[in-house]
Structure formats: structure tokens, C-alpha cells
């Protein structure tokens, strides 16, 4: 849990600060869903399923309550470097807020420092901060970019996310190979065409097709 919900980092992270996830209510609700389907929730294979699902939701939706200060852990450093920093092919998993089915994929993140850089492992953790929620890919992409912008106040931030959505693969239109690409460009990446193209060229070079 976050101690100060009004801290600028907590505000940028768009957290649920007030209370823990109610796992008991989730567990009882899953039992009711099993009964509504017509299943016997007390048979051996399903006996602990409500408990397991509740525990999995605590993990899959942990991003609502991650402490962003603990996540960054003072790993912002003064460095005389003003060229592009790119971390590409960051794996993520999230939950579609419309059907509560997973979507998975990879994120590519870049920034141009003003006078500060962030520890390499913190960028994937920032992706997790926003992916471990009920999400839409468009909002998640923007949140990642805006959070990095608040933390580093760089010359620019760029985020591209590619996703495969189970809500489109397993139900409805049932398209197995369709993938969604979203982007957010701030600062120099939005204003300068050559900077934007340098980033896009870097992440496309040697890229493999996204698949399960």
C-alpha cells in the first residue's frame, strides 16, 4: 500500500490507495459464478478454485496498489548523457477491462534524458505497474509514457505497445493473428520527425512477429 496518496508519483501512477483488494468477496463471487454456470462448486476439481482465482487476481491486478517510490527505489541518477535510451521487447500481460480476459504482448520504451537517467530494470517495472490492472491498451500506453515523463522530466518519451487480445482471439470475431499497436509520443518524439523515426527504426530492426 502507498502511504501518501497525494504524492506526485502516487498521483501519476493512478493508484487505489484506500484499501486492500477484497479477496474474500472475490472468492465467494467465483463460487456463485460456478453455480450459475451449472457446476458443482464442491466437487474435487473445483473445491479450491474460488480461492485460487482470488489469489491469481491479487497477482494479475497488483498494479493498482504498487508503491511507485518503492518501485523506483531511488534509482534515478545524474548522468551527462543526452542521446536516446531505448528498452525494447519488454514482455507484459494485462487484463482487458471489457471482458476480463488477458491480453499479452511487448512494450518498447525510449526517452531522451535532460540530466537524469533511470535504472534499466525500472522501465520494465513501470510497464508492470500499469499492465497489472484492468486495462485498455490505449490508456496503458499513455500512462507508461506520462509516468516516465513525471519521474525524469526528460526531453522526450516514446512508448509503442504491441498486444494480442484473448477477447478477440477466443470469442466474438475469433481472429488469431490480429495484433494491436498503440503509441504515445511526448516532447522531442512528438515534435521532431527525425527523432521519432530513429526510435521507430530501432524497434523495427530485427523484430520478430508477435505470437503466442
Image (cartoon, rainbow, N blue to C red):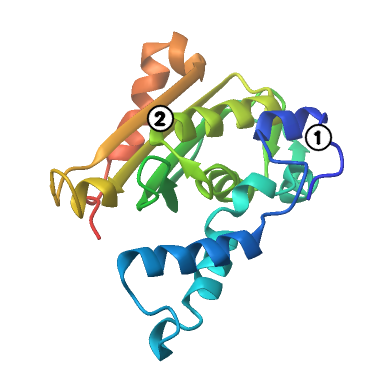
Where residue 205 sits in the image (x, y, percent)?
Answer: 27, 41
Of labels 2 and 1, the one closer to you: 1
**Residue bearing the label numbered 2:** 138
Question: Left or right: where does residue 93 sit relative to residue 174?
Answer: right
Horizontal arrangement in the rendering, residue 91 relative to residue 156 (left or right): left
Give the quarter of the figure containing the C terminus: bottom left
User: How far apart in space, not on screen, are marks 2 and 1 (Cα)?
Assistant: 24 Å
Q: Is residue 120 visible?
A: no
Residue found 46% across the figure and 30% down from its top: 139
Above/below status of 45 relative to 181: below
Instruction: Give the vertical position of 179 relative to 197 (above or below).
Output: below
Occupied quadrant, residue 25? bottom right
Q: Residue under label 1, please give it.
A: 5
Q: How far from the left and from the top, in percent, is residue 63?
A: 61, 48
Name the residue at the bottom extreme: 44
Q: Is residue 95 left or right of residue 24?
A: left
Q: Secondary structure at mark 1?
A: loop
Mark 1 surroundings within 10 Å by alpha-carbon count, few (fewer than 14), some (14 through 19), many (20 or more): some
Residue 88 horizontal/vertical position (percent): 42, 45
Visible in this render: residue 188? Answer: yes
| Residue lying at the far top of the rendered structure | 191
Foreground pick, 67 / 206:
67
User: What's the residue at 67%, 41% (across, down)?
Assistant: 118
Is tag 2's residue or tag 1's residue first in the polypeptide sequence? Answer: 1
Residue at position x 62%, y 31% from top?
148
Between 209 and 200, the one lying in front of the other is 209
Percent coordinates x, y for residue 72 in the rendering: 73, 46
Quadrant for residue 6, please give it: top right
Q: Secondary structure at mark 2?
A: helix
Amino acid at each position: 500500500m502507498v502511504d501518501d496518496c497525494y504524492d506526485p508519483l502516487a498521483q501519476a501512477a493512478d493508484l487505489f490507495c484506500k484499501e486492500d483488494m477484497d479477496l474474500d468477496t472475490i472468492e465467494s463471487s467465483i463460487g456463485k459464478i460456478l453455480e450459475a454456470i451449472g457446476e458443482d462448486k464442491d466437487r474435487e476439481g473445483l473445491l479450491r478454485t474460488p480461492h485460487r482465482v482470488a489469489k491469481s487476481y491479487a497477482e494479475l491486478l497488483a498494479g493498482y496498489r504498487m508503491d511507485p517510490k518503492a518501485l523506483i527505489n531511488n534509482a534515478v541518477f545524474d548522468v551527462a548523457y543526452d542521446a536516446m535510451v531505448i528498452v525494447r521487447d519488454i514482455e507484459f500481460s494485462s487484463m482487458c477491462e471489457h471482458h476480463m480476459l488477458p491480453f499479452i504482448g511487448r512494450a518498447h520504451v525510449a526517452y531522451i534524458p535532460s540530466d537524469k537517467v533511470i535504472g534499466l530494470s525500472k522501465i520494465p517495472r513501470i510497464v508492470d505497474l500499469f499492465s497489472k490492472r484492468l486495462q485498455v491498451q490505449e490508456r496503458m500506453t499513455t500512462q507508461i509514457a506520462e509516468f516516465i515523463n513525471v519521474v525524469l522530466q526528460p526531453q522526450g518519451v516514446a512508448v509503442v505497445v504491441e498486444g494480442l487480445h484473448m477477447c478477440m482471439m477466443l470469442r466474438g470475431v475469433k481472429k488469431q493473428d490480429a495484433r494491436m499497436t498503440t503509441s504515445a509520443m511526448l516532447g522531442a518524439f512528438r515534435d521532431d520527425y527525425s527523432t521519432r523515426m530513429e526510435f521507430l527504426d530501432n524497434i523495427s530492426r530485427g523484430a520478430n512477429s508477435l505470437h503466442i
